Image (cartoon, rainbow, N blue to C red):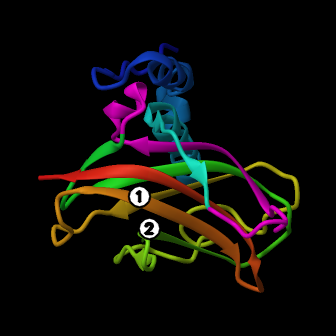
């Protein structure tokens, strides 16, 4: 039986390929059998493929402090500026989709995550963000030395000023807060 044709004018490159490969199995008989978890899985793949890889740096630490996490890659959608190595232009009042791959050097079943405006005086938390990383962002428990992906929509408040920001992202073990993943990337809020 032929596949159901699904136009994909907004998909490009690799995401269109992934979409076409997955839609191959969407025959009328199979379409009714797709579960919501399957749809969520494919949506996450498309989100990850469509997001732009951005430059980031590790959070500053004290000398001789052990590293508890390896950040493998950070993606922001939308971020057309990533190809030029510039800060992501994010519109006020809209959500940005943030995703990163990390390999913890710890095991945990309870994770918290928070984005901050990093400045020289104090890190100010970005408001409106869901902070339970296991409920909204990644599958828990996480295991030591196993690669994981964290994905979330970050609301960009209309109240934030139009300007560049260094965003500090921290993901940590609730039971041992020193066991954390932390990185900084740049955004520029626009109207």
Category of crowding for the residue at label 2, using alpha-carbon neighbours closer than 10 angstroms: few (below 14), some (14–19), many (at least 20): some
In-front residue for pair 13/158:
158
Report the magenta residues as a range. Answer: 60-86
Residue 74 in sight: yes
Is residue 7 found left or right of 121 in the rendered image?
left
Where residue 95 sits, quadrant-wise, is bottom left
How far across and how far down the image is residue 14, in percent? 50, 19
Of label 2 and label 1, which has the lower sequence position?
Answer: 2
Q: Are marks 2 and 1 in contact (CB under 8 Å)?
A: yes
How far across and how far down the image is residue 72, in percent? 69, 43
Looking at the image, is 77 positioned above or below residue 176?
A: above
Looking at the image, is 4 positioned above or below residue 190?
A: above
Is residue 62 found left or right of 80 in the rendered image?
right
How far across and how far down the image is residue 21, in percent? 56, 19
Question: Magenta includes 139?
Answer: no
Question: Magenta includes 69?
Answer: yes
Where residue 11 sits, quadrant-wise, is top left
Name the residue tied to disc 1.
166
Q: Residue at x 38, y 42 (%)?
A: 77
How far across and how far down the image is residue 148, in percent? 72, 52
In-front residue for pair 142/29:
142
Name the residue tied to disc 2.
118
């Amino acid at each position: 039986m032929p596949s159901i044709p699904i136009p994909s004018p907004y998909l490009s490159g690799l995401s269109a390929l992934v979409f076409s490969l997955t839609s191959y199995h969407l025959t009328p008989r199979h379409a009714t059998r797709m579960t919501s978890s399957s749809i969520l899985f494919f949506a996450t793949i498309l989100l990850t493929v469509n997001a732009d890889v951005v430059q980031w740096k590790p959070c500053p630490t004290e000398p001789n402090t052990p590293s508890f996490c390896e950040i493998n890659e950070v993606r922001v959608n939308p971020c057309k500026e990533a190809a030029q190595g510039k800060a992501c232009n994010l519109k006020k009042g809209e959500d940005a989709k943030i995703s990163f791959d990390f390999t913890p050097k710890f095991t945990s079943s309870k994770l918290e995550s928070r984005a901050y405006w990093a400045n020289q005086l104090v890190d100010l938390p970005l408001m409106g963000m869901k902070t339970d990383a296991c409920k909204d962002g990644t599958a828990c428990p996480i295991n030591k030395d196993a690669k994981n992906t964290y994905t979330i929509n970050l609301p960009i408040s209309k109240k934030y000023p139009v300007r560049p920001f260094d965003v500090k992202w921290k993901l940590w073990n609730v039971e041992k807060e020193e066991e954390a993943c932390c990185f900084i990337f740049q955004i520029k809020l626009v109207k």
